[in-house]
């Protein structure tokens, strides 16, 4: 069926084709099919991106909505990670201070410490003698003048006791606190890191909530992309029908929509990263000012490389799944008539 | 090339669109399909292009029984059948070139070969110079010729046309039919639904007449 009887004449004009989405391979031999398939995917992905860029405003809107939706959990994640880091820079294990009675001398304190070192649950026992404590207090707090007025040292000796991490959990530490309090030399016992543990627990809770929020907003992204793709399918109904009429396979018709979903997700993830980074940079100043008031140089860290990768991969995945759902739901309804 | 065996097509809303249609068409034949509107011409063509499946009976195209053709094979079947419509069905936001290239693009044909074949098809319908134009810039007759170029660009052995000249004046219609004759001469099987009886008579090809879904007359070859 030689319809192309004039093809020879047209051959010379084949160069400089106006077709913008043309492939570079020549003939589809069997051995070349994987190459064609791969090329087609690359070309389809690029063409889809081009189509999205061709209508920048709607694309930007969709991407921005996804970005905002993802920036919220991502930002909260950054916040909790920073708090965790802040807390982690303090001693991880609980520290227990045993304040001894005023009448206990530094020497006796040393003896008590020696006894405590035999307790299996303790990692370290450090004696802070009354004189030493006074000296430290004088150096640090700038109370030198006021302290000089005192005729006797008001400070007791203190034993700084660090239990092994295994005994730092709330229950054993309460038990330990009680036993230390029963020492005849002890005045009172303070577990000063309990609030840290509570704080850790709160952080765990918040992070779990962030995960849940992320899950919810991820669903939101799914719906946003799904809806965008659905509208796109409705808009291009004629085109889809005609493509099916001329023998396009379902995969061929589906592909640009799936790529569009992937692009929406990826660009949305990037804009979420951008929003979080801007927020972190904007907060850097106030945070370092606050930190300096606490004599700390705590640096606010942004989204790390791995979390960024995770967000990009996750958002792209959400975009793909969202468009997959829309494509499967709505392309099936498009039949040529 | 085409074989219908006791084909029925029933729509739930409209009743029988085709009843007990049987015929056989050899490869390379050119046949007109005529009858009042609603007589079943479009339905018959749609069954061949697998836009629909028959309610009963067998449709065999190019040795392939369409009843047993799985859904995923439909695209490959359609690539063997060029279809032309009264309303052209062109993509209004694509150039003439891109419209004609579509059947090649979906098969993954190479860039150069696509360009060569598209220009060959456009040359045949006399629109080589308009390849960059958008369909809206063309007249009705030109748009239909773009539709024809698209139908033949992949060199299908079978071309179906549903009222291709329905919106055209007699001179343009004659041009279009002369184009079909040329395809006929190079061996393409053509089936053309039309109610342009004057043209049909002047061209002396086999003609099927449908009346309320029944094949009432097969003129045979002339």
Image (cartoon, coloured by chain):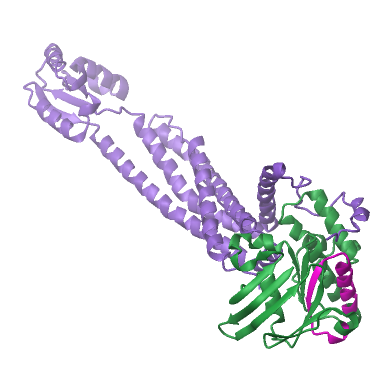
Tell me what residue is drawn at x 75 percent, y 60 percent. Answer: B102
Is A160 positioned to the left or the right of B127 in the image?
Answer: left
Residue A280 location in percent, x, y? Answer: 50, 41
Viewer-closest of B149 and A29: A29
Question: Color of chain A here?
Answer: purple
Q: Where is residue A201 in the image (x, y as percent from the top left)?
A: 28, 40
Between B119 and B4, the residue placed more toward the observer is B4
Q: In which quarter of the image is the N terminus of chain A?
A: bottom right
**Based on the displayed image, in which of its 4 quarters is residue B51 positioned?**
bottom right
State the image coordinates of residue B41 (x, y, percent, origin top left): 72, 81
Q: In this view, does A180 lie to the left or right of B39?
A: left
| Coordinates of residue B186 in the picture (x, y in percent) | 87, 64
Q: Is residue A292 above or below residue B114?
A: above
Q: Colour of chain B?
A: green
Name of the residue lying farthest toward the top? A107
Whether residue B145 is situated above or below residue B33 in the rendered picture: above
Left or right of A13 in this view: A170: left
Q: Does residue A64 lie above or below A181 as drawn?
A: below
Q: Can residue B187 be seen in this view?
A: yes
Question: Is residue A50 on the magenta stretch?
Answer: no
Q: Residue at x 79, y 67 (%)?
A: B27
Q: Give the range drawn in magenta.
A: B173-199
Q: Which of A129 and A154 is in front in this view?
A: A129
Q: Residue at x 64, y 63 (%)?
A: B74
């Amino acid at each position: 069926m030689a319809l192309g009887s004039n093809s020879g004449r047209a051959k010379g004009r084949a160069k400089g084709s106006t077709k913008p989405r043309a492939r570079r391979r020549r003939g589809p031999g069997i051995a070349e099919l994987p190459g064609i398939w791969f090329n087609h995917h690359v070309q389809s992905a690029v063409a889809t991106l081009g189509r999205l860029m061709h209508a920048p405003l709607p694309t930007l809107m969709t991407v921005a909505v996804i970005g905002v939706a993802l920036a919220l959990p991502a930002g909260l994640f950054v916040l909790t990670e920073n708090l965790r880091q802040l807390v982690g820079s303090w001693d991880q294990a609980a520290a227990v201070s045993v304040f001894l009675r005023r009448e206990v001398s530094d020497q006796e304190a040393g003896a008590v410490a020696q006894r405590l070192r035999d307790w299996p649950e303790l990692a370290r026992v450090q004696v802070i003698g009354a004189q030493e404590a006074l000296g430290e207090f004088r150096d640090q707090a700038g109370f030198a003048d006021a302290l000089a007025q005192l005729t006797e040292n008001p400070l007791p000796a203190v034993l700084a006791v660090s239990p092994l991490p295994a005994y730092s959990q709330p229950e054993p530490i309460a038990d330990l606190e009680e036993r230390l309090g029963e020492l005849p030399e002890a005045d009172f016992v303070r577990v000063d890191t309990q609030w840290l543990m509570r704080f850790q627990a709160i952080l765990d809770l918040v992070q779990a909530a962030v995960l849940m929020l992320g899950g919810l907003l991820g669903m939101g992204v799914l719906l946003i992309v799904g809806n965008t793709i659905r509208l796109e399918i409705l808009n291009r109904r004629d085109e889809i029908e005609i493509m099916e009429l001329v023998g396009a396979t379902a995969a061929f018709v589906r592909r640009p929509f799936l790529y569009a979903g992937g692009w929406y997700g990826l660009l949305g993830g990037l804009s979420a990263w951008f929003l979080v980074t801007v927020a972190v940079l904007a907060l850097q100043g106030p945070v370092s000012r606050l930190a300096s008031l606490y004599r700390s140089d705590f640096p606010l860290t942004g989204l790390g490389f791995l979390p960024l990768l995770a967000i990009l991969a996750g958002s792209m995945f959400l975009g793909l799944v969202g468009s997959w759902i829309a494509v499967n739901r709505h392309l099936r309804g498009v039949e040529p008539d | 090339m085409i074989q219908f065996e006791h084909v029925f097509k029933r729509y739930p809303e409209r009743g029988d669109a085709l009843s007990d249609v049987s015929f056989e068409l050899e490869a390379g034949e050119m046949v007109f399909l005529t009858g009042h509107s609603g007589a079943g011409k479009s339905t018959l063509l749609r069954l061949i292009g697998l836009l629909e499946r028959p309610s009963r009976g067998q449709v065999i195209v190019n040795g392939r029984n369409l009843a047993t053709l799985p859904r995923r094979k439909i695209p490959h079947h359609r690539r063997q059948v060029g279809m032309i419509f009264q309303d052209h069905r062109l993509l209004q936001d694509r150039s003439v070139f891109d419209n004609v290239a579509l059947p090649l693009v979906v098969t993954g044909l190479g860039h150069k070969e696509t360009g060569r074949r598209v220009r060959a098809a456009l040359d045949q319908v006399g629109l080589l110079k308009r390849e960059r134009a958008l369909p809206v810039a063309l007249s009705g007759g030109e748009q239909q010729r773009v539709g024809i170029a698209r139908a033949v660009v992949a060199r299908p052995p079978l071309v179906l046309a549903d009222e291709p000249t329905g919106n055209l004046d007699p001179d343009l219609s004659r041009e279009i039919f002369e184009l079909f004759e040329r395809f006929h001469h190079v061996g393409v099987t053509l089936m053309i639904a039309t109610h342009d009886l004057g043209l049909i008579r002047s061209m002396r090809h086999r003609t099927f007449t449908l009346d309320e879904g029944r094949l009432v007359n097969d003129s045979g070859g002339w």
